[in-house]
């Protein structure tokens, strides 16, 4: 009976040893590969793989996620995600700064244009009341008013061209004793120039000139306007070196 008991015990011991070897083998393999045959360990690889993918997508450390176990890998991947978020915030700040800079460089444009020369079409012309010589043989003054009838400010500077027109035309010389100055005319504003003339005296035996029209060309212009001459005859001196009939600058007295 004792002889039979020894083989039985030996057999039981061998079976138990084999069983213990089978149990320890799968557990060690699961720890090395990250997978397990048991139901409890099967959920660990899924978070590890997901965390690894997340870490790679956000710029986390992929080697830490691969070599560590499920719980440790999840922590490393989470840290990688935070680092990625910080980088994204910096890029957003940089873009915002660029937008602000663009707005700054776009401001301050534009500007108002400078006033231009007054044109004949943009001016009104009229002989001022009280013009003309007071007596025969004396000098008289014909004051011609220029009014800006446009909608913008304009400039006049210089002598106008003036022709006295009768049977022929007399182009008047300039009064060089008065220097021209720039005149700025706002819309509706006026300035003037003066035609000085020496009236004709029949008793002098001189040549008479009978003007009927005044042709005026503003400074810098080529187009003219015509006014009526309603005054006495003029002593003709169109060939004289210093005639008593001449025109002053715009804005002169």
Image (cartoon, grey):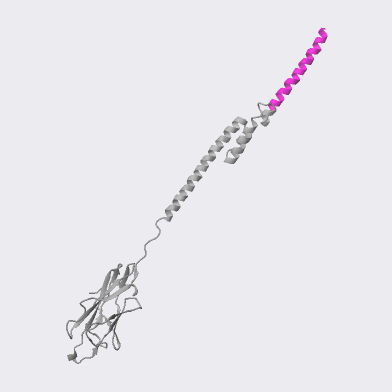
Residue 246 in the magenta stretch? The answer is: no
* Residue 136 image offset from top left, x and y in percent: 17, 85
Q: Which residue is more in the foreground, 77 or 232?
A: 232
User: Farthest residue toward the bottom?
Assistant: 205
* Residue 18 image offset from top left, x and y in percent: 76, 20
Residue 20 in the magenta stretch? The answer is: yes
Q: Which residue is more in the foreground, 34 or 132?
A: 132
Q: Is 188 above or below relative to 2?
A: below
Q: How many marks?
A: 0
* Residue 43 image offset from top left, x and y in percent: 64, 30
Q: Quadrant of residue 107?
A: bottom left
Q: Which residue is more in the foreground, 177 or 139?
A: 139
Is residue 63 at least partly visible in the picture?
Answer: no
Q: Is 38 above or below relative to 234?
A: above
Quadrant occupied by the N terminus:
top right
Quadrant occupied by the C terminus:
bottom left
Q: Quadrant of residue 40?
A: top right
Q: Main secondary structure of the magenta part?
A: helix
Q: Which residue is found at the position 32% from the left and 73% from the top?
A: 123
Q: Is 75 above or below relative to 191?
A: above
Q: Which residue is found at the position 78% from the left and 13% from the top?
A: 9
Q: Quadrant of residue 69?
A: top right
Q: Which residues are magenta?
A: 1-28
Query: Would you say 175 lies left or right of 66 here?
Result: left
Q: Which residue is found at the position 62% from the left and 31% from the top?
A: 70
* Residue 194 image offset from top left, x and y in percent: 24, 77
Q: Which residue is found at the position 29% from the left and 75% from the top?
A: 125
Is residue 76 at least partly visible in the picture?
Answer: yes
């Amino acid at each position: 009976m004792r002889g039979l008991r020894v083989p039985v015990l030996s057999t039981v011991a061998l079976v138990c040893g084999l069983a213990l070897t089978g149990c320890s083998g799968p557990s060690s393999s699961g720890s090395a590969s990250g997978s397990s045959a048991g139901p409890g360990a099967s959920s660990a690889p899924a978070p590890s793989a997901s965390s690894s993918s997340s870490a790679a997508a956000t710029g986390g450390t992929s080697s830490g996620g691969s070599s560590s176990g499920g719980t440790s890998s999840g922590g490393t991947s989470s840290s990688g995600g935070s680092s990625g978020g910080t980088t994204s915030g910096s890029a957003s700040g940089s873009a915002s700064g660029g937008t602000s800079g663009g707005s700054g460089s776009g401001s301050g444009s534009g500007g108002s244009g400078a006033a231009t020369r007054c044109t004949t079409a943009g001016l009104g012309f009229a002989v001022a009341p009280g013009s003309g010589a007071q007596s025969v043989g004396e000098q008289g003054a014909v004051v011609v008013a220029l009014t800006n009838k446009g909608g913008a400010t304009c400039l006049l500077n210089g002598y106008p061209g003036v022709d006295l027109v009768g049977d022929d035309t007399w182009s008047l010389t300039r009064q060089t004793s008065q220097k021209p100055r720039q005149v700025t005319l706002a819309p509706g504003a006026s300035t003037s120039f003066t035609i000085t003339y020496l009236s004709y005296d029949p008793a002098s035996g001189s040549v008479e000139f009978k003007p009927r029209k005044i042709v005026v060309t503003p400074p810098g212009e080529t187009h003219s306007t015509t006014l009526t001459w309603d005054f006495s005859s003029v002593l003709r001196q169109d060939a004289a070196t210093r005639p008593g009939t001449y025109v002053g600058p715009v804005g002169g007295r």
